[in-house]
Amino acid sequence: MKKIIIKLIIFSIIIFISDYTIGKICHFLYVNAKGGYTERNYSIMHRTTEDILILGSSRATHHYVPSIITDSTGLSCRNCGIDGMGIILEYGQLQVISERYIPSITVIDINAPFCIETNDNTKYLSYLKMESHNNLISDILKDIDKTERYKCISQMYIYNSQILKLLADYYAPSILSNDNGYISIKGVTNNFPTKFNDYDFSVDSIKLKYIEKTITEFKNKTKLIFVISPVIAATQTPSVYKPLYLLCEKYNVTLLDYSASYFSLKKEYWKDSAHLNNEGATAFTKQFASDLKKLQKDK
């Protein structure tokens, strides 16, 4: 029995040392990433200094050209979109960023599947887990999944889904953008729909809570602007965005809705069913930048 206990103690020590060591290596790779989405996320949270930040999913990444916005407004701008992410990550990003500075204008591109519709919210925690040492982020993790407080004790768990990406972004990094975060995509879709069909959906109360938390905690600190960028083939705003409208009306927050706009019906502007190509993004950003400039004058 004594030998078994000793073996268990030794095994536990080995596990603890391995977990700690691997966690430290992964943290080093995260902090020192040279490219890819690892560097992008870390840089957004810890290095941004621009006057205007664009937050959102891939529709933010591919739809907003910072140089055009800067030319129009005279303010520095950074595109902080991260593919596949939504309001839960964006709220966390703002929490960390606000510990360093407050941008003059914060634009949040709302993509319904990631910000309004019901789905698995734990998938939005991958980039936040790497910031779990921050109490503000730890609170988000525990709110989405109560077991996270225990899981994040393990350093290997924090990085377990990111290890290959961490290695790639440190040793063989991809450079995602040469225009302060904007990632252009080329080509034109071969499947342009004849019309946009609205669809049934389920509203996620957790996501709406984080939109509301973003508003109540930041509307008096930064000029907060929600945007619905163009939706392919739409001639009216998809009904899924109604909850966003209600929240913005409730708190008197600016909402710019381009979902059913000129850009929605131009086939040559679309790379696929969700994303504008570079030509479309350039045209859309010029319109958005013009509207943003008007908001500057009206304030």
Image (spheres, helix red, strand yellow):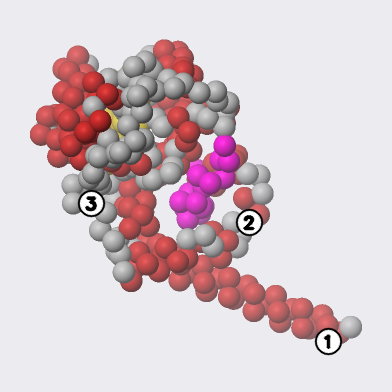
Determine whether label 3 and label 1 are within 8 Å by CB. Answer: no
The CA span between labels 2 and 1 is: 30 Å
The CA span between labels 2 and 3 is: 34 Å
Q: Which residue is mark 2?
A: 151
Whether residue 203 sits left or right of residue 77 in the image: it is: right
Give the mark, 2 or 3, whose residue is nearer the N terminus.
2
Q: Residue at x 77, y 78 (%)?
A: 8
Q: Residue at x 31, y 69 (%)?
A: 172
Residue 297 in the image: above or below residue 97: above
- Label 2 packing within 10 angstroms: few (<14), some (14-19), many (20+): few
Q: Quadrant of the C terminus?
A: top left
| Secondary structure under the numbered disc 1 in the rendered image | helix
State the residue in front, 63 or 27: 63
Predominant secondary structure, magenta span: helix
State the residue in front, 192 or 166: 192
State the residue in front, 159 or 269: 269
Badge nearest the viewer, 2 or 3: 3
Decide whether residue 132 is among the magenta residues: yes
Q: Amino acid at mark 3?
A: Ser
Decide whether residue 177 is among the magenta residues: no
On residue 114, which mark appears? none
Q: Which residue is mark 1?
A: 3
Q: Which residue is mark 3?
A: 177
In percent of width and height, residue 270 lies at: 27, 35
Q: Which residues are magenta?
A: 119-136
Q: Residue at x 35, y 41 (%)?
A: 58
The CA span between labels 3 and 1 is: 58 Å
- Label 1 packing within 10 angstroms: few (<14), some (14-19), many (20+): few
State the residue in front, 95 or 253: 253
